[in-house]
Image (cartoon, rainbow, N blue to C red):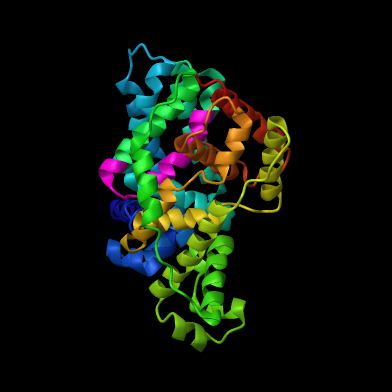
């Protein structure tokens, strides 16, 4: 390959890698990338064959950079006499460092998870991301002496690092992350649970500042619900006025009159996803006779959801968009700090009546379940036993808290 061609090839990958945070896959058209690189659109197809393959090449580069970052983090505590008691500080720093110092890579990972839902081309890359973090947390857990409990750290990080991408108030977010890490540390060490004044404060603030969603007439409400369903089922890139019109049976003119621009339609879709999320938060967890019945039921419910093709895609699209788009930040506090409201009762039943489950524990439990949903989606064979095994490890830790 000639030097000029090699330079153009690398420039395309560099530009795309830098745009996961700013644009995401839905915003990276061939024309836009051409403009950013100042190279003709035809060069994309010359070097990569398709836009999708260019995005995949960028994902490969991001995986290399992420591995190098993980290796650097591990080298920084070479020689430390690590123990489970030291793990909380490590977990908080890794989560914050990843989401702040490596924000572009953090977005690339989440975009890859979403892309894998709509195109098998990204399946291997998504699995490589999962394998990268599995190796990282297995190694960290080995050094800190966590043993089989590493699956809990891995699942909690996968979900907590997603929410930490959403910026609300930097000081509060960082302090609440420390409390989350210390609560996880208490699970891992069987020690007393720490107080969580920052998360309690953030939770109360989130409740007070719940966005006032607009009243919609029947037609607009149908559009909002349909737009949200398109994102949930088909992804952000498939949301268009025409697609909404076809799904609702309305005319294109009616949809365009109610929501005149693509940003307005997008905001309506996320309003619909947010409404659904709030309804989920306010739902009641099903009652079970015993803790074992509940754990088995949770495993069966999650497995059944995955086997039916269900996933958290719409919610994940909402999280990514809220982390990226300042106009959606009104949802940030609620998404970050109202987690665990439905899971609280279930976890309380699982640990028993000898102690009271707090809001941070409930959020951790909710995140653990959501991460299981992401991790095992697309693997329908014998899902329930694997989920039940992971739940058993987590519940055993929560029950042993002092």
What are the residue bounds of the magenta stretch? 152-172
Q: Is residue 369 visible?
A: no
Query: For residue 28, which quarter of the picture?
Result: bottom left
Identity of the residue drawn at 43% across and 45% down: 162
The image shows residue 372 at horizontal and vertical percentages of: 58, 40
Q: Is residue 351 above or below residue 277?
A: above
Q: Is residue 401 left or right of residue 5?
A: right
* Rendering coords of residue 65 (x, y %): 36, 39
Q: Relative to residue 246, is residue 89 depicted above or below?
A: above
Does residue 56 sit above or below 214 in this rendering?
above
Q: Is residue 195 visible?
A: yes
In the shown orientation, is residue 188 left or right of residue 34? right
Seen at 67% across and 40% down, the residue is: 298
Q: Nearer the viewer, residue 258 or 191?
A: 191
- Is residue 353 on the magenta stretch? no
Q: Is residue 170 left or right of residue 27?
A: left
The residue sitting at 45% across, 36% down in the picture is: 360
Q: Main secondary structure of the magenta part?
A: helix
Q: Position of residue 87 (x, y in %)?
A: 40, 22
């Amino acid at each position: 390959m000639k030097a000029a061609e090699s330079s153009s090839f690398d420039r395309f990958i560099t530009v795309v890698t830098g745009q996961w945070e700013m644009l995401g896959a839905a915003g990276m058209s061939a024309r836009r990338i051409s403009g950013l690189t100042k190279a003709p659109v035809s060069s994309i197809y010359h070097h990569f064959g398709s836009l999708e393959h260019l995005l995949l090449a960028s994902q490969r580069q991001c995986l290399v950079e992420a591995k190098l970052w993980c290796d650097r983090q591990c080298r920084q505590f070479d020689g430390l006499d690590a123990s489970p008691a030291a793990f909380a500080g490590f977990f908080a720093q890794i989560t914050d460092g990843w989401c702040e110092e490596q924000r572009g890579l953090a977005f690339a990972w989440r975009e890859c998870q979403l892309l894998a839902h709509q195109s098998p081309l990204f399946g291997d890359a998504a699995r490589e991301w999962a394998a990268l973090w599995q190796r990282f947390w297995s190694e960290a857990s080995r050094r800190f002496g966590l043993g089989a409990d590493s699956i809990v750290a891995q699942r909690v990080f996968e979900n907590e690092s997603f929410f930490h991408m959403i910026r609300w108030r930097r000081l509060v977010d960082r302090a609440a992350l420390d409390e989350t890490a210390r609560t996880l540390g208490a699970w891992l060490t069987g020690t007393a649970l720490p107080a969580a004044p920052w998360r309690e404060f953030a939770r109360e603030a989130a409740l007070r500042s719940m966005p006032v969603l607009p009243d919609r007439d029947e037609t607009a409400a149908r559009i909002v619900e349909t737009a949200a369903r398109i994102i949930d089922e088909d992804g952000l890139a498939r949301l268009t006025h025409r697609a909404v019109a076809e799904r609702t049976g309305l005319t294109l003119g009616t949809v365009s009159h109610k929501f005149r621009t693509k940003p307005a339609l997008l905001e309506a879709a996320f309003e619909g996803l947010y409404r659904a999320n709030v309804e989920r938060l306010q739902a009641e967890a099903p009652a079970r006779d015993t803790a074992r019945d509940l754990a088995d039921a949770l495993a069966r419910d999650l497995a059944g959801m995955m086997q039916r093709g269900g996933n958290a895609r719409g919610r994940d699209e909402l999280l990514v968009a809220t982390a990226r788009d300042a106009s959606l930040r009104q949802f940030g506090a609620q998404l970050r700090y109202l987690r665990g409201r439905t899971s609280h009762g279930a976890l309380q039943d699982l640990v028993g009546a000898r102690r009271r489950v707090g809001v941070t524990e409930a959020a951790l439990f909710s995140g653990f379940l959501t991460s299981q949903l992401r991790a095992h989606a697309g693997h329908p064979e014998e899902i329930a036993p694997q989920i039940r095994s992971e739940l058993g490890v987590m519940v055993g830790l929560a029950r042993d808290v002092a």
